[in-house]
Amino acid sequence: SKVPKIKMLAEANARSGFFEVDQFNRIVAELPEYLHAPLHVARMTGWRIASEILTRKMKHLDLNGGWLRLDPGETKNGEGRDFPLTPALRAVLVAQRERTRALEKERGIIVPWLFHDDSGSPITSFRTAWLGACKRAGIRRLPHDLRRTAVRNMVRAGIPERVAMELSGHKTRRVFDRYNIVNDADRARASELLQSHLGAQSTRKVTPLPERTNAL
């Protein structure tokens, strides 16, 4: 017998979340302090939290050269990657380094990790803390939404998309485009720009062309 065709429902795009600044700040405020720095870094760099941020050690931070580094073989595509230390990113990482030094002095230990918990141990999971923070803040977001947010911010800052892809570690344009999300604020801004452009056209003085005469 002939197998009937079953019409599949269109799948909603699950990769559509991103953070507005106030949403991010509200969730971070509900998290333990040791999670603040790595999440700020995730929002600015677009790097993968578990494999590319929480695995950073002090040796990967080059304050003199102005880079946060991923060595070849550490990334999903196997290629190394450096992210430039913007003033905001540098401030977060310098404060984190000072926090680590204070912990080392207090406990008499050496902490190789750039991000760590209050005991100096690497952060392996924060799912429970994240879910609790989202509930208290009244916001439903995934940590991975920070990656989407970073990509979106780079593009809107005017960074060429090819450069943004290299900074965030996106190998294919298809995936990058899925992360470069347009929201209502973007559409409103586009409307303003279009209206400004059309308004300038309507007020521009038009110089009439001289009448053409046929030569005798």
Image (tube, helix red, strand yellow):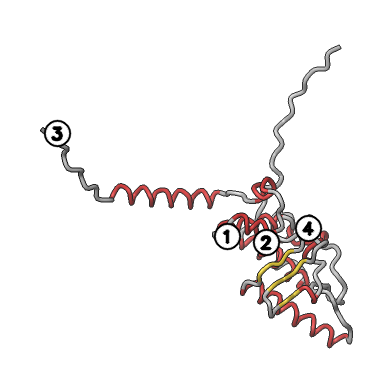
> Could you tell which of marks 1 and 4 lies nearer the N-terminus?
4
Q: Which of the labelled discs sits on residue 76, or is there none?
A: none
Three-letter amino acid code at the position of disc 1: Ile
**Residue bearing mark 1:** 159
> Could you tell which of marks 3 and 2 lies nearer the N-terminus?
2
Quarter of the image that includes the C terminus: top left
> Could you tell which of marks 3 and 1 lies nearer the N-terminus?
1
Would you say residue 206 is visible in this rendering?
A: yes
Report crowding for label 2: few under 14, some 14 to 19, many 20 or more residues within 10 A (C-alpha): some
> Could you tell which of marks 2 and 1 lies nearer the N-terminus?
1
- Asked if the residues shown at circle 2 and circle 1 are in contact, with their CB atoms under 8 angstroms apart, the answer is yes
**Residue bearing mark 4:** 131
How far apart marks 4 and 3 lie (CA) works out to 81 Å
Three-letter amino acid code at the position of disc 3: Asn
Three-letter amino acid code at the position of disc 2: Leu
Question: Which residue is painted at 75% across and 62% down in the image?
Answer: 133
How far apart marks 4 and 2 lie (CA) works out to 28 Å
Quadrant in the picture for residue 160: bottom right
Report crowding for label 4: few under 14, some 14 to 19, many 20 or more residues within 10 A (C-alpha): some
Along the viewing direction, whichever of 202 and 183 lies nearer the viewer: 202
Per the image, label 1 sits on a secondary structure element best described as loop
